[in-house]
Amino acid sequence: MITIDDKQYDETKLSDDGKAALNNIQGISQKQNNLRVEFSHNEILLKHYMNILKLNLPKEVKKNKKINE
C-alpha cells in the first residue's frame, strides 16, 4: 500500500506508467536523503578542518613600537 494525499492505494494495481512513476519517486527520495546525509557530513568536516586551521594559524605580531624609535 502507498499513501498519497492521505489516501491509501494498492500499488500492485498501478498501470505500468504509474509503477514507473512510483519507482522514480522512490529513487529521487532516496537520492535526496543521501544528499542530506552527505551535506550534514560535509558541514561537520568543514567545522573540524576550520578548527584545525585556526589552531595552526601563525601568531600575530604585535606592533607596539613608537614611530620615532
Image (cartoon, helix red, strand yellow):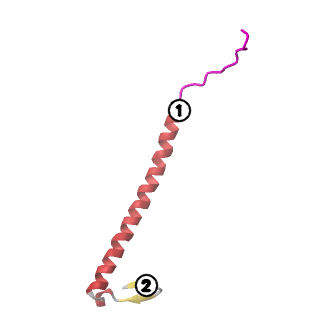
60 in the magenta segment: yes
Residue assigned mark 2? 4
Against 36, is 7 above or below? below
- For the N terminus, the quadrant is bottom left
Could you say where residue 66 lies in the image, as x and y percent from the top left? 73, 14
Disc 2 residue type (three-letter): Ile
Secondary structure under tag 2 reads strand
Q: CA distance from mark 2 to mark 1?
A: 52 Å
Identify the residue at the far front of this view.
68
Magenta part of the chain: 57-69
Could you say where residue 3 lies in the image, as x and y percent from the top left? 42, 84
Majority secondary structure of the magenta segment?
loop
Could you say where residue 10 lies in the image, as x and y percent from the top left? 34, 89
The residue at the point 44 percent across, 61 percent down is 36
Q: Residue 32's quadrant in the figure?
A: bottom left
Towards the viewer: 66 or 55: 66
Towards the viewer: 45 or 63: 63
The residue at the point 36 percent across, 70 percent down is 28
The residue at the point 42 percent across, 58 percent down is 37
Secondary structure under tag 1 reads helix
Query: How many C-alpha atoms fall within 10 Å of the one at disc 1: few (<14), some, or many (≥20)?
Result: few
21 in the magenta segment: no
Query: How many C-alpha atoms fall within 10 Å of the one at disc 2: few (<14), some, or many (≥20)?
Result: few
Residue assigned mark 1? 55
Rendered image: mark on residue 24: none
Disc 1 residue type (three-letter): Leu
Against 30, is 61 above or below? above
